Amino acid sequence: KAGVTQTPRYLIKTRGQQVTLSCSPISGHRSVSWYQQTPGQGLQFLFEYFSETQRNKGNFPGRFSGRQFSNSRSEMNVSTLELGDSALYLCASSLTGGFSYEQYFGPGTRLTVT
Amino acid sequence: LAKTTQPISMDSYEGQEVNITCSHNNIATNDYITWYQQFPSQGPRFIIQGYKTKVTNEVASLFIPADRKSSTLSLPRVSLSDTAVYYCLVGDGAGGSYIPTFGRGTSLIVHP
């Protein structure tokens, strides 16, 4: 079974621009979560989508948004990029999400904002 | 938000058993405790999950005391390839939402 895939793997953007990252979950998984990983803050939860609906959201500004399509693929968008948005963005999928779930992570998208 | 605390780093030698403890004093009734392993430039990889008492799989054991305020990941007979960062994850169900909260991670270095 193919794992979680994320595209692109690397991205360089300029302050003020916006960016869209893509995630394809494992086949059959309906929950997709997004995380931001930085050396300073560690792994932080952004949001979770399940059946095309945002089910949970972390403590990030509204510049961070996402969506999920009917095939469970998900995208996240960051508008008006700031230098502090430079991070590894990880996508994780699971069968149903919720309180008890094993997440499968993708390799991440390394975003650099200059 | 639920907060987890782990040691920042640990050192061990090949063949030894390694125990990494995570504190989660505010764990909620519905929260499970999950441990992940992460190598550089890769996403975290699931190791083990439990709710209470002891869980064992082919790679690790997880010990959870009755009060569930902490958990210990046990790696038997580590090898060099176990050098990685280990994360403890609990869910935060406060306010009706589920916010997975990772610890800051424990960097384990296994020496020959």
Image: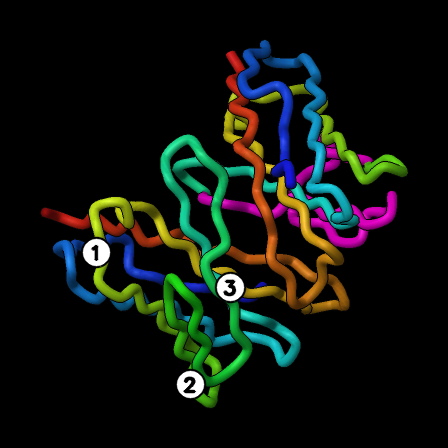
N-terminal of the pair, mark 1 or mark 2, is 1
Asked if the residues shown at circle 1 and circle 2 are in contact, with their CB atoms under 8 angstroms apart, the answer is: no
Q: Nearer the viewer, residue A33 or A77?
A: A33
Q: Give the class, few, some or many, for how many residues have Cα within 10 Å of label 2's Cα (few <14, many ≥20).
A: few
Image spot of residue A57 (x, y percent) = 72, 50
Check the image and report above or below for B111 versus B17: above
* Residue A61 sits inside the magenta stretch: yes
Q: Nearer the viewer, residue A93 or A111?
A: A93
Name the residue beneath numbered marker 2.
B65
Q: SS of the residue at dot 1?
A: strand
N-terminal of the pair, mark 2 or mark 3, is 3
> Marks 1 and 2, Cα distance to the nearest angstrom?
22 Å
Image spot of residue A94 (x, y percent) = 68, 52
Name the residue beneath numbered marker 1.
B10
Q: Which residues are magenta?
A: A42-67
Confirm whether circles 1 and 2 share one chain.
Answer: yes
Q: SS of the residue at dot 3?
A: strand
Q: Nearer the viewer, residue A54 or A101?
A: A101
The numbered dot on residue B34 is 3
Residue B65 in view in this figure: yes
Image quadrant in which you'd find residue B106: bottom left
